[in-house]
Every structure is written in C-alpha cells, then in structure tokens.
Image (spheres, rainbow, N blue to C red):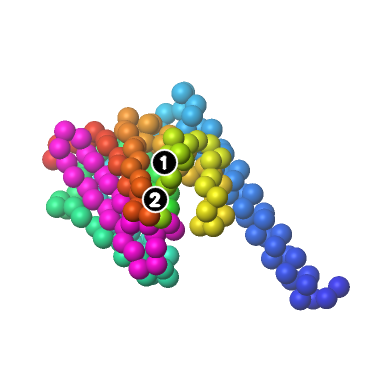
C-alpha cells in the first residue's frame, strides 16, 4: 500500500510491457522479412540522406558516451531502389550497436563509396566480437552476454540481414576483440 512502492511496481510493469511490445514487433518484422512471398515496396531513395538523418538521430546517445560519429562520403547523394523505412531501420540497428559497444570517447565511422556496387561501411573501435561468436551474430535471438546487450532482444541483426537480402544486397561483418567491429553493406545503385 506504500505509494512509493506502488509507483515502482507500476514503472516496472510498464517497462516490461514496453519490452514485450518491442519483442513482438521485432518478431513480426522478422517473420515478414523471412517470408519469400513478402515483397518490399521500392522507390528511389538517397542512402546519403538516410545515413545523415540517422547520424543525427544517434548523436544524442553518442554524446552521452562522448562517442563521435564521423561521416565520410564524397557525394551529395547516392541513389538506389529501396524501401526508405526498412533501410533506415537496418542502418539504425547497426549504428545503435556501434555506439552502444564503443568505448567511452570512441568513434563510429560511416563511409559510403561507389564502385561496381554501392558500399556502406559502419565501423566502431569498441570492444569487438569474439571469433567464436561471429558465425552466430545474425541468428534469431542470439545475444552476447555483455552488459551492453542486456536490454536487446537478439533480433536486431537478424532483421538487418533480412532487410539487406530483400534489397538484393549483402551484409558482412569484420571484427576483432578490443579493436572494434565493421559492418559492410553492398547494394546495386542507380547511375546519376
């Protein structure tokens, strides 16, 4: 009956419900993405704009950890066919993880280059991933046991991979413990 304790219980229940809501939403998204009949609505999107917007979106979290988000692209825009919302979701998962797993005062680099393919690299200089964990990071419900991952659902990277595949793209990961992690995306792009 103590009002303070009642408030604590309500806050805990709200937090648990919010977590469950996010988990159910993530499961629904992943289920859709894995369905071979699910087709993404594609239009011309600017990858530079998406990543610039996301860099601003994660800047608040990055500031709290004194992490710098550096952007490297020699073009004003890079166009491809894709689903703006899904691409934004995919890159947000990776950027959010890059900041989350970076050391205090670290740096996250976002690089966009064009060659045969459009290549997007998102690299942090954080704690890295152990070699024995690398084969499993895109698996559904896989979570590292690190404290930074305590609130994760284990679905973010699985969803990111499915979104890349639905855009006929690839996603690769390079990582070394204590040296950082790099995600490399490749997509077809539109000539300007």
Q: What count of labels does the image hold? A: 2
The image shows residue 173 at horizontal and vertical percentages of 35, 41
Q: Residue furthest right?
A: 1
**Residue 44 occupies quadrant:** top left
Q: Do the CB atoms of the residues marked 2 and 1 lie less than 8 Å apart?
A: yes
The image shows residue 126 at horizontal and vertical percentages of 37, 57
Residue at 31% x, 50% y: name it. 122
Query: Tag on residue 177?
Result: 2
Q: Secondary structure at mark 2?
A: loop
Q: Which residues are magenta?
A: 98-126
Q: Is residue 127 visible?
A: yes
Marks 2 and 1, Cα distance to the nearest angstrom? 8 Å
Most foreground residue, 144 or 54: 144
The image shows residue 20 at horizontal and vertical percentages of 64, 49
Mark 2 vs 1, N-terminal side: 1
Q: Is residue 124 magenta?
A: yes
Residue picked out by circle 1 = 131
Q: Is residue 93 magenta?
A: no
Q: Is residue 138 visible?
A: no
């Amino acid at each position: 009956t103590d009002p303070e304790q009642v408030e604590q219980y309500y806050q805990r229940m709200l937090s648990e419900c919010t977590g469950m809501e996010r988990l159910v939403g993530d499961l629904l998204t992943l289920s859709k993405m894995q369905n071979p009949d699910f087709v993404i609505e594609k239009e011309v999107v600017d990858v530079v704009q998406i990543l610039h917007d996301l860099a601003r979106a994660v800047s608040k979290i990055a500031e709290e950890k004194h992490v710098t988000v550096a952007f490297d692209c020699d073009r004003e825009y890079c166009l491809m066919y894709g689903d703006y919302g899904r691409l934004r979701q995919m890159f947000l998962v990776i950027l959010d993880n890059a900041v989350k797993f970076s050391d205090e005062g670290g740096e996250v680099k976002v690089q966009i280059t064009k060659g045969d393919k459009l290549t997007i690299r998102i690299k942090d200089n954080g704690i890295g991933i152990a070699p024995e964990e690398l084969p499993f990071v895109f698996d559904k419900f896989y979570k590292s046991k690190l404290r930074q991952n305590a609130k994760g659902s284990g679905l973010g990277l699985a969803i990111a991979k499915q979104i890349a595949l639905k855009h006929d793209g690839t996603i690769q990961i390079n990582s070394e413990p204590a040296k950082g992690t790099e995600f490399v995306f490749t997509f077809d792009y539109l000539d300007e």
